Image (tube, helix red, strand yellow):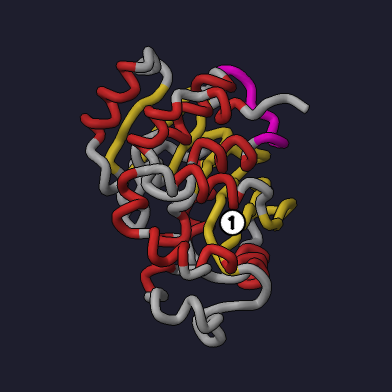
Amino acid sequence: MKTPYTDNYDHAFLRDTMMGPNAMRLTEELVASLPITPGMRILDLGCGKGISSVLLAEKYDATVFAADLWISPTENAERFAALGLDRQIFPLRVDATKPIPFAHNYFDLIISVDAYQYFGSNNTMLATLLPFLKTGGYVAVAVPGFIGEYDEHNLPDVVKPFWTPEWYFYPLRWWKACWEKEPGITLNTVREMDTCQQAWDDFMECDMAQEIMVSMMEAGVGDYFNMIQLTGIKN
């Protein structure tokens, strides 16, 4: 079996740039079955510090628009330039809840890794994004959630002391129902991702995780986490 690209990546770099479960690892699984070709234009929405964009540029030779609301485009630009990727990855500040500053029918793929839940847990975001995607293009997201049928109304006892509505965790069936309402796409993948546990284990090595996650994980909350992949094709 081929070793994942992420496993061979500079661990120090990843520890400095992860803001949650390892977005490079999740991206690698998310796009593994998608037809990505060199030069393809990809919108990475909610890219954080850009490690998802780095994977797409380095492994697939794609052209990536790394859009985020909270991380400075200047900070990301410096990071991409240091990797020699400044001609392939273009950092931008974008609020997905406001008018999006891109041309229609422009992108071959729109992805969002561990970010879509914050702005896309509604019946309108897919319809908002689809005009920017070419016909036949893909939209693919990875969102955290609860395994099985857990949601805010029937949380496991171990989760209750830590949970807040700002997690925006929903079970797989909820996301499937949400995406099936959008007539502009054909939904072709809804599944729990294989690398969820490894992505969280990667993050737990980071200083940021040590500050905020240790007590939660030691209590066993992570046993109820999953990562959900949704992929659709624009009709």
Q: Amino acid at mark 1?
A: Met
Res. 98 visible in picture: yes
Q: Residue at 59% x, 18% y: name it.
A: 38
- Location of residue 115 with respect to 80 vertically, above or below: below
Residue closest to the eye, 164 or 90: 164
Q: Residue at x 58, y 65 (%)?
A: 223
Residue 233 location (% of width, % of height)? 67, 46
Which residue is at a point 51% across and 36% down the rendered structure image?
A: 24
Q: Residue furthest right?
A: 1
Span colored in magenta: 32-39
Q: Which residue is mark 1?
A: 227
- As drawn, 80 above or below 134: above
Q: Residues within 10 Å of mark 1 (few under 14, many from 20)?
A: many
Residue 67, located in which quarter of the rendered image?
Answer: top left
- Residue 208 in percent (x, y) is at 31, 48
Q: Main secondary structure of the magenta part?
A: loop
Q: Position of residue 89 (x, y in %)?
A: 40, 24
189 part of magenta stretch: no
Q: Residue furthest front?
A: 218
Query: In the displayed structure, would residue 30 be above or below residue 81?
Result: below
Residue 112 visible in the displayed image: no
Screen quadrant of the N terminus: top right
